[in-house]
Image (cartoon, coloured by chain):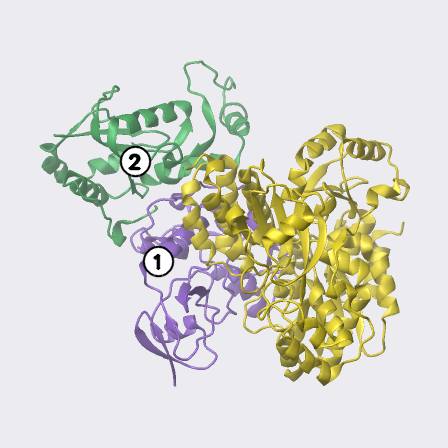
Amino acid sequence: MSSVSEEVDLLVGRLGERPLQILVEIQKTFNHVPTEAVEGIARKLGLPVSRVLANIEFYSFLSLEKPGDYVLLMSDNITDWMAGSRSLYSRLCSNLEGIADATKTSCTGMCDQGPAMLVNGIAVTKLDENRIDSIADLVKRHVPLSSWPREYFHVESNIRKSGWLFESGRRKVLEGQALLQELKDSNLRGRGGAGFPTALKWASCREATGEKYVVCNADEGEPGTFKDRVLLTHCAENLLEGMALCANIVGAKRGFLYVRGEYRYLESHLAKMLRKKRSEDFTVELHWGAGAYICGEESALLESIEGKRGIPRVRPPFPVTHGLFGMPTVVDNVETFCAASGIAAGGGKDFRRFGTDESRGTKLLSVSGDCSKPGIYEYPFGVSIEQILADCGADEPIAVQVGGASGACLDASEFGRKIGFEDLPTSGSVMIFGKNRDMKEAALNFSKFFAHESCGFCTPCRVGTSIIEQILESGNGLAEMPDLAGILKASHCGLGQSASRAVMDMLKKFPGHWGLS
Amino acid sequence: MKNLLLDGKMLTYEEGQTIMDCALSNGIAIPGLCHLPGLSPSGNCRLCTVKTGGRYVSACTEPAIDGMEVECETMELSQVRMQLLRMLFVEGNHYCPSCEKSGSCRLQEAAYHEGMLDLHFRPFYPKREMDASHPEILLDRDRCIFCALCVRASREIDGKNVFDISGRGIETHLIVNSASGKLLDTDISVEDRAVHVCPVGAILVKGKGFEIPIGRRLYD
Amino acid sequence: MIRISTCSLAGCFGCHMSFLDMDEKLADFSDKIEFDRSPFTDVRKMGKCEIGLIEGGLCNVENLKVLKEFRENCEILVAVGACAINGGIPAMRNHFSLDSCLREAYVEGIGIENPQIPSDPELPMLLDKVRPVFEAVRIDYFLPGCPPPAEAFVILLEALLKGQKPVLPENLIRYD
């Protein structure tokens, strides 16, 4: 292994002015960021030391302290809890007492094959007592990760139902202005949940002046979603094609693919795809997230690429005019770029056959929780919750959480509702709660998630999410919740504004679970 | 000339101004802790939350729009401000009787103005580090409310980078730019604007405590 | 007659002193109120009261017991002063572990003779952290200040005697 300062020199040479990526690589090599590296990066890039430190203390996957040879992070989503992660975590901790520390991390996007964990940044799935004991043993014996049983790292794709998106062709027949018109006619809307018309976004960026960027948001951190994981695995070419088509329309030469750190295991695959799709006109660089849900918010994501803490920007101005490095930028998510490339190949007419008037096309849903067939389901927009529940083998569920921790919690009376911008807009997370589940647990889990993931920028979210966690943990002060939910609406960004939504739904719809009538 | 309605009063503003700018230039004070004319707006304290078009926005960052209607002095917004102030009080360690800034503290003044009598929320009593390393300047993190005025003043006025906000969520904290993490080892000087913009008693000039007698302080 | 009880938990009796600062106003009140349990009367047993004034926060189990007794016996309970409201100066010990506080005070501090941490069973157990009173019982009104000004006590008592909700003018809301 090279010395810290050599490594910093090497990385600065390779990655240039991208301090966060340099930190991510340093962390990968040394399992922490040595002080020497902090000072080296600051000196080399002409940054204040405090700026580098602030980054390390912001991103969960970066740390100043050397933890030993293994960094063990247990995925702590509600679906992991439901699959028994908490007792496995205790088991692991007691197995490793005095030898290594395990900690918890937010949803790792393996909800269809949890409980899961990250070992030195690489996903380990399908944990059970045997696997946990064996991992503890491997750690005790200092067995390098490369010699661990391969099946531990196996990630299933679990595509249960594929449709237009998965099956769309890869040969583009449309590009440029013609494609833009086709996107407009097809009424493709952003798949992240907000549903902004894609053609309008691309056209606005095209009209803006300055150096342009195309950024793909593959930082899916919403608990319960894992569609990007599957799209990156199976449709990376379509995705890169979609980005290139966008670059061609807006006039961008450089793009970034921002992938959440949890999917680091996909690195060699993605690097291969990037090499394959490399072109003179448009280059895409990989950017690895480092454990911050907030970076899924597009302006925080741009800050993060710029090497800063992921604090959402004040908007307006919007990224299409003032985005990456202050330049016009298109930020879209993986599914949106894939859909755009699908439309370029098959035309908008084919796309328009699916969905509803408001929500054209299909939507990938990440289905997990209490069902016999968790995985990815592609449906035309307008599909009902009932239909999804029937298809995935959910037995008498009492609740479905749509849209992740920031989404809505539906009780059985609402299962007739439909996925789509006009009813249930969602990035695609569908978590199912079976008949014996205690929704108190789900509420507690989500409150912990938001308290952990709040960026800390604004008062209501920074303090409010911690107060809510305190209330749900102690069970005292539940009567305060409506008031707190109101105050959170004064937050700077969507994270804070939606942080109490699911918990409020659960309190209202399942009062009996708290002993309330 | 463009106009907006603030609590029913017609105010004029110039293109490019925020709601806060507009109010200030019309001699109206919207409560706020993280805003100081001359520094770029941030919008972190949210105390200047106003309501327009049915949603909350921070007046210091929201651009004024011709004809917009803005509410500020309503029961609802007063309650929002009250809860935000309580949150700021409980997340830090604010012992006014022992604070040199007491009486000239903007947090205190805003809370007096809203009529805050109690904390309502359980205090967090966080453990935060005091930095007394510098001979002339004291950094008492117990009182920091992360308004980032010092961060911005240092960058935008002093041309330095003495302060930064680090960490996240409830672990957010103020750090200084030196390898030792101590104020002494930064290039701060007591004349810096950054030393004098703190709305609370987190950054204080040493040797000046309780200089003004009680009863004659800024907000007495 | 309106019966009032008062107590100082983890406080300094400063709020009680400020109460006495009402001076001639006290004479006006004297035919309307009488003290039950209070350091003013040195009565330690309490009966039913209309009003209870709590000075100081909670630093030991004895404080907690007294506070609960006040809540049980008083119709209206008022948290008086910074310590009752947010823990105040005593809560500055929350920065440190209980053990290090005791060691500093009784073992390692300057000028200590015969160093030992008091452990007489008569002494009430200290709480891990000093806490405000509203965390333990319901509080009806709050009178901030260190101490609250005498005028604030006047406004409080006049309103309560008339059966009204006390409203402090902005100039009497002080945290120091």
User: The disc labelled 1 sits on which kind of residue?
Assistant: Glu
Q: Are marks 2 and 1 in contact (CB under 8 Å)?
A: no
Chain B tint in image: purple
Please tell me whether mark 2 sits on a helix, a strand or a loop.
helix
Residue at left 25%, top 29%?
C74
* Chain hosting mark 1: B
Q: Residues within 10 Å of mark 2 (few under 14, many from 20)?
A: some
Please tell me whether mark 1 sits on a helix, a strand or a loop.
helix
Give the number of the disc on residue B76: 1
The reply, left or right, for residue B115 in relation to residue A511 is left
Q: Is residue C176 above or below residue A7?
A: above
Q: Which chain is green?
A: C
Considering depth in this image, is A443 or B34 the residue closer to the camera?
A: A443
Q: Is residue C61 above or below residue B148?
A: above
Residue at left 52%, top 51%?
A414
The reply, left or right, for residue A48 in relation to residue B119 is right
Q: Tell me the residue that label 2 is attached to.
A: C14
The reply, left or right, for residue C93 in relation to residue A293 is left
**Position in image of residue A369 (x %, y %):** 65, 44
Residue at left 31%, top 48%?
C174
Considering depth in this image, is A65 or C109 the residue closer to the camera?
A: A65
Q: Which chain is yellow?
A: A
**Position in image of residue A380 (x %, y %):** 66, 63
The answer for how far apart the CA atoms under marks 2 and 1 are is: 36 Å
Where, by quadrant of the figure, is residue A117 drawn? top right
Considering depth in this image, is C6 or A458 the residue closer to the camera?
A: A458
Q: Nearer the viewer, mark 2 or mark 1?
A: 1
